[in-house]
């Protein structure tokens, strides 16, 4: 055995010296008095959850929530197209700690969800932290000051720039969302059209604006599937241009709801039901439990050749053929030959029914170009329109449109755009060792193939809040994930998806709009899997820099906060974890 002679005064080998002298920090354990500036980017669900939890759980934090719009809501503020609604039951699309007992319908409209978000933000008085009209234009890490320098364009309510400003932050949380960046489709002549032209992400009019008009809707994603049935009763004619295929699922309905109505798609809660939800919390809790359990019970459908997958293909094909019986050519062109869930699955209430209406045409012939008066397809036919609606989706590459430059000049635009064929990350929330103190909510591989997305957002926020708390408690100046942890997580992620339907051949935003490629949008597992993985941070996967050369400098001067400030010096007796006695 090797014996090392230690100096009892320093704890170091005899003769060894510190490179810098150590002195006790004059504060109680874990309470240096240091404050952290935290910048939250975005005021959608992510920003609202983060604002509430940071305010609740962290002291010595100066929080700013920067939002480019002039209201909260994120994607639910920016999207307002006809028929907009959530394809998750409304009571499952609510924060766990802030239920809404008074949803009007089983599937809530976008307008109602926006109202819910505004109400939550107002209840928790987030206006203290909100900085509207701030559009992030660049972020750069300063290694000397250990801070992020943030550049913002100041924009008015129409999005027009009228100035610039600079801010610094010790910690940045990105919550800008993936369903807010849109572009016009790359179709020849798209800007030559002389009629009315909308993108689904910037649709300022209601369906009544198309009264008596001829309308073209381009796309077959979830937006198009909601827009077509919304316009059909008003328009003289609606032509839906569809280049791909999609599964239209039966609307989700809990067993509890099916007892009341065979059709959940348009189910409206009665005043009596809303009142009972409010007045009987136990009843409401059981109601929501039943729905969430069933949502979490369909994860098996995402696995290749599973019994649930086979059953879903048969059931959905039968459903679609039945609803499209009046126009069988649509069923032939539209029913997929790929697995259920390979593309995002949507219940699409009323969509198939609208397609068989006399004033709706389904056009699967490819578009050659857009003219001043309409659309020409590759077979030479030209159709004229008053309005063209581009329901062609969003930029889902995850590559930021602004430079986010960390250590060594590492720009996320290049890291996630050129260096790898996929956005590399750690548990969807951290980028890599060159981007310390930078966290992401709803980042790559953060959506769900099944289950409640908002619960995942809440758990990501909990993880990030715990990380900031550690930085405050231990007086950490930088916290950065190790590259080997990023590499191991990405290896796990890619291996997992090999056994799922998401990696089969179909064009999907899950794969950044490609038919084949790495799955970049979805969590590699079920919703419950994500909750359990994020429950306990792996602090060993990070590197840290402390303000003191001694890693235990943060323990202070030997006193506790309770002794110094006059608190309860026997507080531990009120927090006893009493073990059960075995019988």
Image: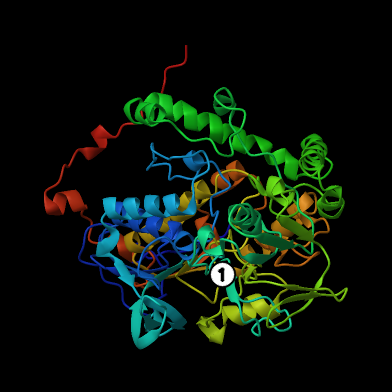
Q: In this view, does 12 lie to the left or right of 130?
A: right
Q: Is residue 381 left or right of residue 535?
A: right
Q: Could you tell me residue 515's position as x and y percent?
A: 80, 64
Q: Can residue 389 be seen in this view?
A: yes
Of residues 293 and 489, the one drawn nearer to the viewer in this rendering: 293
Q: Which colour scheme is used?
A: rainbow
Q: Quadrant of the N terminus?
A: bottom right
State the residue position of label 1.
431
Q: Could you tell me residue 321's position as x and y percent?
A: 82, 41
In percent of the image, x 54 and y 49: which residue is there?
86
Kindly indicate the quadrant of the structure image that contains residue 483.
bottom right
- Report the residue that reaches farthest toward the top: 583
Of residues 472 and 449, the one drawn nearer to the viewer in this rendering: 449
Q: How many labels does the image show?
A: 1
370 w.r.t. 294: above or below: below
Of residues 215 and 157, the one drawn nearer to the viewer in this rendering: 215
In percent of the image, x 55 and y 73: which residue is there?
433
Of residues 390 and 5, the one drawn nearer to the viewer in this rendering: 390
401 w.r.t. 46: above or below: below
Q: Is residue 182 visible?
A: no
- Report the residue that reaches farthest toward the left: 566
């Amino acid at each position: 055995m090797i014996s090392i002679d230690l100096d009892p005064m320093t704890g170091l080998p005899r003769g060894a010296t510190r490179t810098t002298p150590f002195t006790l920090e004059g504060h109680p354990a874990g309470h240096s008095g240091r404050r952290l500036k935290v910048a939250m980017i975005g005021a959608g669900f992510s920003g609202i959850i983060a604002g509430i939890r940071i305010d609740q759980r962290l002291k010595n934090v100066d929080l700013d929530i920067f939002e480019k719009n002039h209201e909260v809501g994120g994607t639910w503020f920016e999207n307002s197209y006809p028929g907009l609604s959530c394809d998750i039951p409304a009571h499952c699309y609510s924060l766990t700690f802030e239920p809404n007992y008074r949803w009007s319908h089983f599937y809530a409209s976008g307008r109602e969800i926006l109202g819910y978000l505004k109400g939550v933000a107002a209840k928790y008085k987030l206006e203290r932290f909100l900085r509207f009209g701030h559009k992030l234009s660049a972020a750069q890490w300063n290694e000397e000051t250990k801070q992020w320098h943030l550049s913002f364009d100041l924009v008015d309510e129409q999005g027009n720039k009228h100035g610039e400003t600079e801010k610094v932050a010790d910690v940045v949380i990105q919550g800008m969302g993936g369903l807010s960046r849109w572009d016009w489709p790359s179709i020849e002549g798209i800007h030559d059209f002389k009629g009315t032209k909308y993108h689904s992400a910037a649709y300022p009019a209601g369906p009544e604006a198309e009264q008596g008009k001829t309308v073209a809707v381009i796309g077959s994603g979830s937006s198009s599937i909601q827009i077509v049935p919304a316009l059909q009763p008003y328009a003289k004619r609606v032509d839906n241009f569809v280049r791909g295929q999609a599964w239209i699922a039966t609307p989700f309905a809990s067993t509890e709801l099916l007892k009341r109505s065979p059709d959940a798609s348009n189910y409206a809660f009665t005043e009596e039901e809303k009142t009972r939800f409010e007045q009987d919390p136990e009843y409401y809790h059981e109601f929501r439990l039943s729905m969430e359990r069933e949502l979490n019970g369909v994860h098996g459908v995402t696995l290749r050749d599973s019994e649930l997958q086979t059953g879903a293909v048969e059931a959905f094909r039968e459903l679609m053929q039945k609803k499209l019986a009046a126009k069988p050519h649509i069923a032939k062109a539209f029913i997929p030959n790929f697995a259920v869930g390979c593309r995002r699955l949507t219940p699409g209430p009323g969509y198939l029914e609208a397609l068989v209406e006399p004033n709706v045409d389904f056009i699967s012939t490819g578009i050659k170009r857009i003219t001043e008066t309409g659309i020409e397809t590759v077979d030479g036919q030209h159709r004229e329109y008053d309005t063209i609606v581009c329901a062609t989706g969003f930029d889902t590459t995850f590559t930021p449109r602004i430079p986010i430059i960390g250590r060594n000049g590492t720009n996320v635009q290049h890291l996630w755009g050129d260096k790898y064929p996929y956005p590399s990350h750690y548990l969807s929330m951290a980028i890599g060792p060159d981007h310390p103190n930078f966290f992401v909510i709803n980042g790559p591989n953060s959506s769900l193939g099944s289950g409640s997305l908002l619960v995942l957002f809440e758990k990501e926020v909990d993880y990030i809040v715990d990380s900031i708390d550690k930085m405050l408690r231990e007086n950490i100046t930088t916290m950065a994930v190790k590259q080997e942890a990023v590499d191991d997580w990405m290896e796990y992620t890619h291996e997992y998806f090999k056994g799922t339907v998401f990696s089969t051949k179909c064009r999907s935003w899950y794969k950044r709009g490609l038919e084949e490629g790495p799955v970049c949008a979805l969590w590699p597992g079920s919703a419950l899997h994500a909750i359990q993985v994020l429950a306990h941070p792996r602090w060993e996967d990070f590197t840290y820099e402390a303000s003191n050369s001694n890693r235990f400098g943060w323990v202070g001067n030997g006193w506790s906060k309770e002794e110094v400030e006059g608190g309860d010096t026997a507080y531990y007796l009120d927090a006893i974890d009493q073990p059960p006695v075995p019988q």
